[in-house]
Every structure is written in C-alpha cells, then in structure tokens.
Image: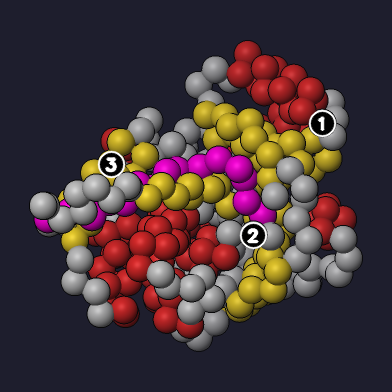
Amino acid sequence: MSAGEGIAPLVEIAPAKLNLALHVRARRADGYHALETLFVFAREGDVVTLAPAERDHFHVTGPFADAIGATADNLVVRAADAFRAAFGIAAAYAITLDKRLPVASGIGGGSADAAATLRALARRHGVAPGDARLDAVARALGADVPACLLGRAALGTGRGDDLVPIAGLDDCPALLVNPREKVPTAAVFARWDGIDRGAIAAGETLARAVAGRNDLQPAAEAIAPSVRGLLGALAACRGIRLARMSGSGATCFGLFDDVAARDAAARAIAADHPGWWQLATAVR
C-alpha cells in the first residue's frame, strides 16, 4: 500500500484577515514596527488541502495562482518544513493551495495560507491547537501567522503577534474590494510618517474600530491612488457601518447593516468598476 492510501485529505480554509483598525506606534530596534490592531476574519478565503504522499508535492490552483512566485519558497512549504522540524516528523505530503484571494493585498495572504497548513498538519498528527511548539513555529514564520493561526477576533500588539481575544462581529455582512493593484508591505511601512497618533480605544469591538484608523492608508494611497477612490465608493453606499483599508492595502472593506445593503453595494461598485475584485462575505 502506498503512503497515505485510504486516508482522506484534510481541507483547511485560510480565511481573509481584516484589520478593523491598525495603529502604528513606533519603529522598533529589530526592524519591525510597534503596532496595535484589531483583527477579525472573513468566512471565506484560500483553501489548503493536505494529503499523505510518497514524496513532497506542492501545487497552486485558483484564480490567483499565476500571481504566486517561486513555489519552493512559498510560506505553505516553509510552514510544512518548520512543522516537521519542530515535531520530529519525517512524513511527506501533497499540498494544494487554491489561491482565491489577491496576492499582496493586506488580507493575510501567505500568512493565512501558512496558518491553515499548520492547522491541517496539527490535525493530522494530533497536535493540540494550544501547543507551545506550534505557536513558536507560527511566530518564526512571520508576524501575521500567529493571528491567522488563532483565527478569531483579537487585539494584536507588539509586532501584531501578542494576541488577546476580543468579541467578534457575529457574522456582520462585509464586502471586500481590491482594485487589482499589488501594494508591497515593506514599501508601505517605509512610507509611514513616523507619527504616533495614539492607542486604540477600549470598548465594544465595532465602536473601537470606528473610533480607530489605519495609519498605513496615506502611504498605501501614495503607491496605489485607487485606494482613495475605492474607500470613497464604499463610504457612499447605503447601510455602511465602516469603510476602511485592511493592513497595508490595497484591499478595502465595508461593514454593512444587513446583507441586502452589502449586496446592493456590491452591484453598484461592480457596475462602476467591473475590473475590481470583490468578495461578499460575513466577518466573525
């Protein structure tokens, strides 16, 4: 019998991560920035499928597969290698990444894919979600990976990976829109003006978000001017509760009073900007 024969593949969603607020407080000596951010997650995202195999194989499918660079250095591959090293596992895997979310777009991307890979491997090998070794692997892979591994609403501080769970948004209707412009994260942070505009307020999650801001938005707009127009289009929609850029951009999102308002906004924006990518979803 070949490796894995008769064992069903494991499927993990890598949901889009949204920054309801993102406050940049300072540059750190280690090259990172001191952040305060409110994370929530969409219901949909990329999809990682993992199955035992005779030898390692990594394949990318989906509408944004062509935007993926060298697959040998993909965070999914690095996550699998790091997991095996941390837990002393020699097994091989066939991993497929269905890339449904835009690349370099401020909604988790490779970090979410890596976290989904770690969750699938943990399930396969009976590793508890709270295992300290799993968290250490996530932290070594990147600042956003621990939040994506947690996969629930949280306040992130430090690099964004010191996490405190918070109340979520109970499937609030949301519309994600991307103008199909890549905005490199490093370039956006390099343009941050260095001004500390203060902490995220305490209180109920949505109220904290509305009172907050995304300090990277001006830098992202300088690189991708369409972000300003996109936010304006969302803000003009009926039933909008919050319109904001996520992460370092260029994806922006709107939170809506109800599904009807969200879907009306999606139709209106699609009519005016048929080339823009959209995802109508709900956020947790």
Would residue 204 be found to the left or right of residue 226 on screen? right
**Magenta stretch, overall SS:** strand
In front here: 98 or 279? 98
Image position, residue 82 (x, y; %):
30, 72
Image position, residue 18 (x, y; %):
63, 51
**In this orientation, does residue 228 appear?**
no
Whichever of callouts 1 and 3 sits on the residue coming sooner in the sequence is 3
Residue at mark 1 to residue at mark 2: CA–CA distance: 21 Å
- Check the image and name the residue furthest to the bottom: 29
Q: Which residues are magenta?
A: 39-54
Task: Answer with the quarter of the image where residue 33 lies.
Answer: bottom right
In the image, is residue 215 above or below residue 241?
A: below
Is residue 49 a member of the stretch shown in magenta? yes
Image position, residue 91 (x, y; %):
20, 66
Q: Which mark is residue 60?
A: 3
Would residue 161 be found to the left or right of residue 72 on screen? right
Q: Which mark is residue 152?
A: 2
Image position, residue 268 (x, y; %):
70, 17
In front here: 168 or 130? 130
Q: Crowdedness of circle 1 by 10 Å Cα count: few (<14), some, many (20+)?
A: some
Q: Which residue is mark 1?
A: 258
- Check the image and name the residue furthest to the top: 271
Asked whether the residues under the numbered discs 1 and 2 touch, taking CB atoms below 8 Å apart as contact, a structural biologist would say no
Q: Crowdedness of circle 3 by 10 Å Cα count: few (<14), some, many (20+)?
A: some
- In what element is the residue under mark 1? loop
**In this orientation, does residue 100 appear?**
yes
Residue at mark 3 to residue at mark 2: CA–CA distance: 26 Å
* Identity of the residue drawn at 70% across and 69% down: 165
Is residue 232 a member of the stretch shown in magenta? no
